[in-house]
Structures are given as C-alpha cells and as structure tokens.
Image (cartoon, helix red, strand yellow):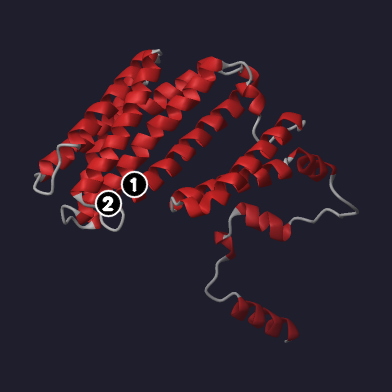
Amino acid sequence: MTDQKAEGRGRTATAGFDRRLLPPMLLGLLRLPKEARTGESPQRGRLAAQLDLPGMALFAVTLISLLLFLMNLHLRDWYLLVIAAAASAAFAARELRAPIPFIDLRVLGGNTPLLVTYGRALVAYVVAYAFLYGFTQRTEEGFGLSPFHAGLVQIPMFLVAIGVSIVSGRSKGVRGKLLVGALGQVVACAVMLTLTGDSPVWMLVLVALIFGVPQGLNSLGLQNSVYFQADPERIASSAGLLRTFAYIGSMVASSTAAASFGQRADTGGMHHLAWIMLGAGVLYLMQGVR
C-alpha cells in the first residue's frame, strides 16, 4: 500500500512530462554518478590560466568607450576618447607581454600587407553597414515603406551576394575580388546620390542589386587575403582581428548614419551619408589598386 501511494505521488509529480524527451546530456547530468570534488580540477585550473581576463577587460573598456562616443558625436564627450586611447594603450602593452594573449597583436608586427588588409576591411565595412543601417531607414521614412516592405527591398542584395559568393568562391584570385568589390561600392554610392523622394521603387531595388556585388566579393577577398598574408601559426588570431576591424567599421557606420540623418532620414541626409560612403569606397578602391 505504501509503495502504491509513493508510486501515485511520483506519477502526479511527473504528470504530463515524458522523461524520454530529455536530451541525453541532461539525462547524463541527472543520472550518472558525480565525481568527488576534493579541490580545483587540474583541467579547470589550466583553462583559467589560459584566459586573459585583464586583456578582455581592457578590450571591453576600449570598445565600449569608443562606442559611447560614436553613438552621440559631441565635443563634450571628449573624455570618452581619452578613456578609449588609454585603455587601448594598456591593452596593447598587456597583450604584447601576455604568454597567452586574448588578441595576439604580434600578428601585426612587420606584416604590412596584413595591416593594409585590416585597413581595407575597416573602410569596406563602413560602406556596407552604412548602407544596411542608413538605406533601410531612408526607405521607411523617406519613401513611406513599412518595415516589412523595406526589408523586401534588401532581399535582392542578399540574393546577389549569395550568388556572387558561390561563383567567385571557386576562384583563388584575391586582387580581382577586391577591385570589383571596391568598384561596386563606388557605383552603388554614386547611384544613391541620384535618389530623391520621388524616385520609383525600382531605383531602390537597383541600388540594392548593385550593392549585392561588393557584399558577396569583399568578404571573400578580405578573408582570402588574411589567409595568404598571415603567419600560419597565428591564422586564428589574424582572422579574429579581421572581424574586429569589421565591427569597428560597423560602429563608425552607425554613428555616421545617425549624424547624417539627425531627427529624420530625409533626402539631404541620405545624400550626405552617400558622400561619406563614396569617400570610403574610393579609399578602399585606392588601397586595392596598390
């Protein structure tokens, strides 16, 4: 009788829940015997020693202070730039001395082509993200499109980018990808300068289609450049730095779009943003020609 009551209580507690649906890993945590812990695990200790916590903290302070400054460009926030500069200097000093650095800055030493690639990535992603942020906002406020339809206008760009990546990805060439990608950005920015509030929707789609070409080529070209230019023993750190410069480019692009539009994304703000994007695109093209 006692066993039946206990069984009934167990059924009540688990009513509507099938234990067979638990993932194997969760079942293992619940059922497998736990190892006795007499102290810190050697493996855990080694993992903790490999984490560059001071470097992570300094890197976070650098990016956060820079991001806060770029989010609202004003001279009264000059102290944020001072904090970013001081934190970045301390971060560089820390990483160059750390046995296992968070970001291995040694990959930059004496490797001029790799530094140029990072510069290309910065300006290329300023253009790319400025288009994603600014053009979408402009299509909504300036052309009266809903967020859904503004997203549909961007779909051709992504489809072209996917197609270009598939086709060009089979080629090992790098210089051609960079040059065509840079030219694509310049042409797309020039077309943006012709847009007005009365432009037809097909013009918006045309700009998105043109931007799809550099979107598909630049990422491949920059990644291939890092692969060929980086020290094979530091390829992971080099690839990580490429993404870091891309994210910095996105930060610059977001602040540029905000400064160009102000309170409303009008035609004048879009043209102002397009001129900045065009300048960055020309700089990217000049770097690719060198």
Badge 1 vs badge 2, beta-carbon distance below 8 Å: yes
Q: Determine whether the residue tagged by mark 1 lies in a helix, strand or loop.
A: helix
Nearer the observer: mark 1 or 2; the answer is: 1
Quadrant placement of the N terminus: bottom right
How many numbered circles are shown? 2
Circle on res. 129: none
Question: Can you identify the residue that label 1 sits on?
Answer: 257
- Give coordinates of residue 180: x percent, y percent: 30, 20
Residue type marked 2: Gln
- Give coordinates of residue 132: x percent, y percent: 32, 43
User: Can the viewer see residue 170?
Assistant: no
Question: Where is residue 284, by image quadrant?
Answer: top left
Q: Does residue 149 sit above or below 275 in this rendering?
A: below
Question: Where is residue 11, by image quadrant?
Answer: bottom right
Question: Can you identify the residue that label 2 sits on?
Answer: 137
Question: Where is residue 263, by image quadrant?
Answer: bottom left
